[in-house]
Image (cartoon, rainbow, N blue to C red):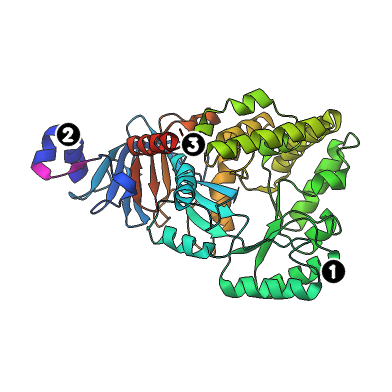
Amino acid sequence: MYRIACLLVVAFLTFGCRVESAIPDAVAPDGPLAIVGVTVIPMDSEALIERQTILVEGDRIVAVGADDEIDVPSNATLVDGAGRYVIPGLAEMHGHIPPPTAPREYIENVLFLYVANGVTTVRGMLGHDGQLELKREVFDDEVIGPALYLAGPSFNGNSVRSPEQAERKVRRQADEGWDLLKIHPGMSRASYDRMAETAQELEMRFGGHVPEDVGLLHALEMGQETFDHLDGYVAYLGAAEREVSDEELRAIARKTIEHGAMVVPTMALWESLWGVADASELASYPELKYMPPDEVRSWANRYRQRSAQADKVASTRVIETRMRLLKIMQEEGVEILFGTDAPQLYSVPGFSIHHETKRMAEAGLTPFEILLSATRNVGDYFADQDDFGTIAAGKRADLVLLASNPLEDIANLGAVEGVVLRGKWLSGDDIKSRLAQIAESHQ
């Protein structure tokens, strides 16, 4: 078998196999890509499968199996996975992409920051006119970036002032090709209902916030698919004003399941938005060097204002309730989708996943449960558009190579040694080099 020959240094000359080297800008290798000797965490079960080879051709995984069972073609690019772990690419289900009016360098940097941290899929939750062209560029490999699924410009109290306007906006966004509708606060119940009815007619997904006039229960009844930031739950439970019992939390979790809804918790960011995070800790995040200094300064100013205005007692009660609610939702079987709401307020694209996973673990979720929310659950969500989220033949080739086992400690997601992005290999050295360039551009 060529695989055995390629693992031996002497045989590289004999059989012509190529050692993995830096591939600038995630260029697709000439021929197949093979990760050999790796421990696979397939995410279709909580398993560690050692000494595996993953063979990739084009943007698909074509074979996964024991090292001595997979024939690796002689023209394959090899990635040595010995002592390493591979997981499916991660997803950011409440991310933001800069508008087309932003500097092109900034847009491309944001996309790369996601990928550098193993985020290979982003559901963009605030669309801008012209942004669908960027989605095409990413899928056509004209720019390095995660697969983009984009909500259109938001439905809110300013953009939608009547049921008729809501219906027109839904139909226009469906015609334009947006992947879903983004709900912001402010819409009237009548406008929301028309939006929901039209969306269901056109089979358009919708999610996001819960307008005050609508309320959580009615939004569930109208078929809102995702509740981002656990929006609507705090108001429904009255969590800012009182202690909420576990029985109440379980009841609303079961109601969520009854209506087939999903949640995108964004736990870490919401602590900042409620003004109870440690300002000095936020300001010390090392990843801030990858963001424009003016943006970081604006975050600092916003946080000072929020913290000064916050009712610390009520805010702390809300955060504690959210943590309990997340754990109970996991126990009850609510579908949880991973998201961080980056970039904003110290939530740096890609790097924000590490703060989010930490808080999810502190809420009581296991590493496997956290990984599920960012891999298989997201693949299930997008099953009608592509096949990804687990490691198996036929899946989209989005993979993250890690130095340490994330099932032992979810913080090991930070030990990225390479990313396969729709079949293209980006080595750890490539990632570090591009990150250094981004940081230098902001000095």
Q: Nearer the viewer, residue 150 or 14?
A: 150
Report the side of 158 relative to 284 (left or right).
right
Residue 140 appearing in the image: yes
Task: Locate residue 291, reporting x and y percent.
Answer: 52, 38
In terms of sequence position, does the residue under pointer 1 or pointer 3 come before the other?
1
Residue 432 is covered by the magenta coloring: no
> Helix, strand, or loop for circle 2?
loop
Q: Which residues are magenta?
A: 14-19
- 159 w.r.t. 407: above or below: below
Report the side of 385 relative to 246 (left or right).
left
Q: Residue at x 84, y 56 (%)?
A: 217
Nearer the observer: mark 3 or 2; the answer is 3
Quarter residue 343 falls in: top right
Which residue is under mark 2? 8
Q: What separation in Å lies between label 2 and label 1 (alpha carbons)?
A: 69 Å
Q: Amino acid at mark 1?
A: Ala
In terms of sequence position, does the residue under pointer 2 or pointer 1 come before the other?
2
Residue extending furthest toward the left: 14
Q: Residue at x 53, y 47 (%)?
A: 91
- 313 w.r.t. 220: above or below: above
Q: What separation in Å lies between label 1 and label 3 (alpha carbons)?
A: 43 Å
Nearer the observer: mark 2 or 1; the answer is 1
Placement of the C terminus among the 4 image quadrants: top left
Which residue is under mark 1? 190
> Helix, strand, or loop for circle 1?
helix
Contact? badges 3 and 2 (CB < 8 Å)? no
Task: Locate residue 279, reporting x and y percent.
Answer: 68, 26
Q: Amino acid at mark 3?
A: Tyr
Report the side of 209 relative to 383 (left or right).
right
Q: Residue at x 69, y 41 (%)?
A: 330
Which residue is under mark 3? 290
